[in-house]
Image: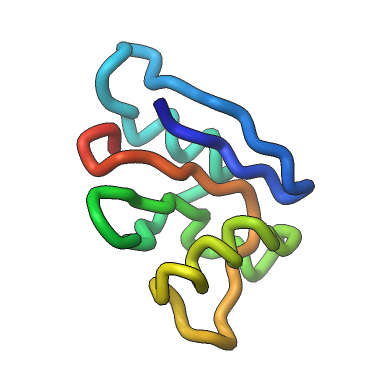
Amino acid sequence: MATLIKTDGSLTEIEPKNGQKFELEELQQYVQGYIEFVFLKGDINLIINDDGKDRLPLNEKATEIAHNEAAIYPRDYICGDAVLCKDWEA
């Protein structure tokens, strides 16, 4: 089970439509555009909008997760909704 991290800080459990693995189009709908993977420790990924900084609001929760995992630079940040999921789900 994956988690959708909204820019308002809310978390929603989500599942792939086929019950196994998210399709590209599903992930693009969740993040509202092209996807980019932020690799966290272990087998966890944070999937974000590739160009979210240009047009989407700051996602403080996703940014905090990425900083805690040292997955992005200290001054970097994430904008737009993000999907937190296991490697095998994406």
Residue 41 lies, with reference to residue 76, above or below; the image says above
Q: Residue at x 47, y 84 (%)?
A: 73
Q: Residue at x 54, y 48 (%)?
A: 82
Q: Residue furthest right?
A: 8
Q: Identify the residue shown where x is 56% and y is 37%.
A: 4
Q: Nearer the viewer, residue 70 or 82?
A: 70
Report whether 75 appears left or right of 36: right
- Image quadrant holding the C terminus, namely top left
Viewer-closest of 89 and 42? 42
Q: Quadrant of residue 71?
A: bottom left
Give x and y (percent) for residue 56: 70, 58
On the image, the x and y values in percent for residue 37 come to: 35, 57
Which percent across, then down, holds residue 61? 65, 57
- Could you tell me which quadrant the N terminus lies in? top left
Q: Nearer the viewer, residue 68 or 17?
A: 68
The relative height of residue 25 versus residue 85 in the rendered view (above or below) is above
Picture colour scheme:
rainbow
Total marks shown come to 0
Would you identify the image quadrant in which residue 85 lies?
A: top left
46 lies above or below 74? above
The structure residue drawn at horizontal position 27% and vertical position 25%, both measured from the top left corner, is 21
Q: Position of residue 32 (x, y in %)?
A: 58, 43
